[in-house]
Amino acid sequence: MKHQVVIITGVAGIGKSSVARLLAQKLGCSYYDGDDFHPQANVEKMQRGTALKDEDRAPWLQSIHNFIVARLPLESLVLACSALKQKYRDVLEQGLPAAQVQWVHLQGDFDLVYNRILQRAGHFMPPELLQSQYDAYEASRSGLKIDVNQPLISVVEQIAHLLEAQSEMGVLGLGVMGTNLARNIADKGIALSVFNRHVEGAEENVALKATQKYPELAPARPYDDLRTFVASLQKPRKILLMINAGPAIDEVLRQLTPLLSEGDVVIDGGNSHYRDTGRRMDDLSRHRIHYLGAGVSGGEEGALLGPAIMPGGSAEAYALAAPVLTRIAAVNAAGERCCAYIGAGGSGHFVKMVHNGIEYAEMQLIAETYAHLRWEQGLSPEGIAEIFAEWNAGSEQSYLLEITIVVLLKKDTDGLPLLDKVSDAAANKGTGGWTSIAACDLGVPIPSITAALFARYQSALKTLRTEYAAQFQPETAGRKPALDDLKNLYRFCRLMNHHQGFRLIRAASEAYQWDIGLEALAGIWSGGCIIRSRLLADIRAHLAHQPDILLVPSVAGFLAGHYTSVARAYQMLAGGREAIPCISAGLEYFKYMTQEESSASVLQAQRDYFGAHTYQRKDRPGEVFHTNWI
Ligand code: 6PG
């Protein structure tokens, strides 16, 4: 193991030497006092009461630095040194590997330090001199900041606790998801370090406050200094990044990489794009650092109580992270943990992205069914909740249907349905769009997912919709399908949605050689995540025998046996005023996919007509034709 130097800084009289001496004892290493390195000229100057200038300090700081460089190959050391300014600290650590230098900044109010000095026998410092130290002090960019307003022994214990490499796992980024995952991890008795960046006036002492607020996090080590956070982790280190997808991840990796060692694992638990994850994996592999792209689903509550986790990357990296990840994951109805190795590269984030695409369509199907029942059939939210509750109690059970029932029953303070006051312009964070683009890249049709995405885009065009609505008031011939037909239509469209999602994953797995196990994935998705449902548990059972759910005899039997009922309901909804883009996409997908002859002959002929793009003939397969159509 590489040796380390711990440098204790702070104003005169704050207790650097006492803290450093005791800390060295506790850590079992040598203690050195920076003051012992002053050249004779400086000592004489100070004895005369003359303040040192920067040019006086230069040789002093350099000789401390040289000393550290000489000792580090031999031993770890604790050094007390005022180093009030950043430029002094820069001299001390110049060229040293970041992971070998730990800064500890002792901090305390002026009055506290002054009173302590007064109480010390034989030690007197005029207030002006102490004030000048406070004036000269520059806040540190990195390092532990320790409040000395506690007994000396507590200060030392706190520093030792924070410096010791004892945590099994680190969570970096304490937003809602990060905090809840950290609480989940700590709750399992896993020794944990938590880190959140310091942003003046916006994110201050976030990690510390989290450990004070949540009892499960009380034993966790809190940091806002990356270096000490990293140093607090057992090797190989495991760090779970819970930060916003995008450039923020690259920035954190830029800072983190030099602090890590070969064999460490960084796990990105956010909704990162799978291509970014693949790129980061390659970048870090050059440093022999593992990178896992782990899709995490289940929202805030899932993160706390058990999410579904979809880790992708090298099997070796997964083996290192698995003991923690599997322990914090949800358990599905079959009693299995909702976490399993997905496959190589960015596959973990790819399947999480598709999960979100399926989520978009699942949500949209419920919304369209609700809108029909509410505005075409004139049912109340309570009445619709009752219907959904019946569906949810049987084959259509799902988390999303379950929460919709709660939403429907929620009243505002005036006793009226809160839903009626919720804006009808839907937002999105992009994963539905990524799914659609990925499907286009691979040439895989996912019309239900894309229809759900585009429906959100249309919803957001509120002003335009309002303007058009004033001009168009079409006569509608909406009719009321039997509830059984409507339920069959809903199930039909859900099957189409899942079929599309799984086909997309299969295509990606083949194209990118990820070797994704679909059955295991469906197992993960049957608990913890947002799209968990009885349908997914059924699909999981089917996938054990047949990778294409439309070819599963019981599914095919349902589709064939209920098509008339479904088409009946579909016609009635299609004739109504409420838009049903996702329902219609699902049904049209089914029609197209189950039609041996398609209308695309017309397209091929047109293409050949205007662009000589050539075509193939049904009666002469394998040959290519071009016709002069005029
Ligand atoms: C989950 C969710 C989660 C988040 C989506 C929502 O699985 O826990 O999918 O990842 O809620 O990012 O995305 P939109 O804002 O695009 O709806």
Image (spheres, grey):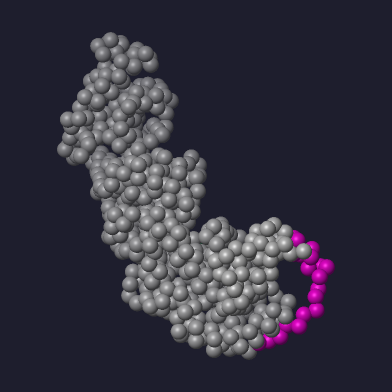
The residue nearer to you, when weighing 357 against 564, is 564
Picture residue at 37% right of the left edge, 44% below the top = 284
| Vertical side of 530 occupied by 219: above or below | above
Q: Quadrant of residue 459?
A: bottom right
Which quarter of the image is occupied by the C terminus?
A: bottom right
The residue nearer to you, when weighing 384 against 398, is 398
| Vertical side of 207 occupied by 58: above or below | above
Picture residue at 61% right of the left edge, 88% below the top = 564
Q: Is residue 613 left or right of residue 24?
A: right
| Vertical side of 455 occupied by 178: above or below | above
Within the magenta stretch, is there residue 297? no
| Vertical side of 603 occupied by 538: above or below | below
Q: Quadrant of residue 327?
A: bottom left
Counting from the top left corner in percent of width and height, residue 424 is at: 66, 66
Picture residue at 28% right of the left edge, 47% below the top = 263
Residue range (magenta):
462-481
Q: Quadrant of residue 386?
A: bottom right
Which quarter of the image is occupied by the N terminus?
A: top left
Within the magenta stretch, is there residue 477? yes
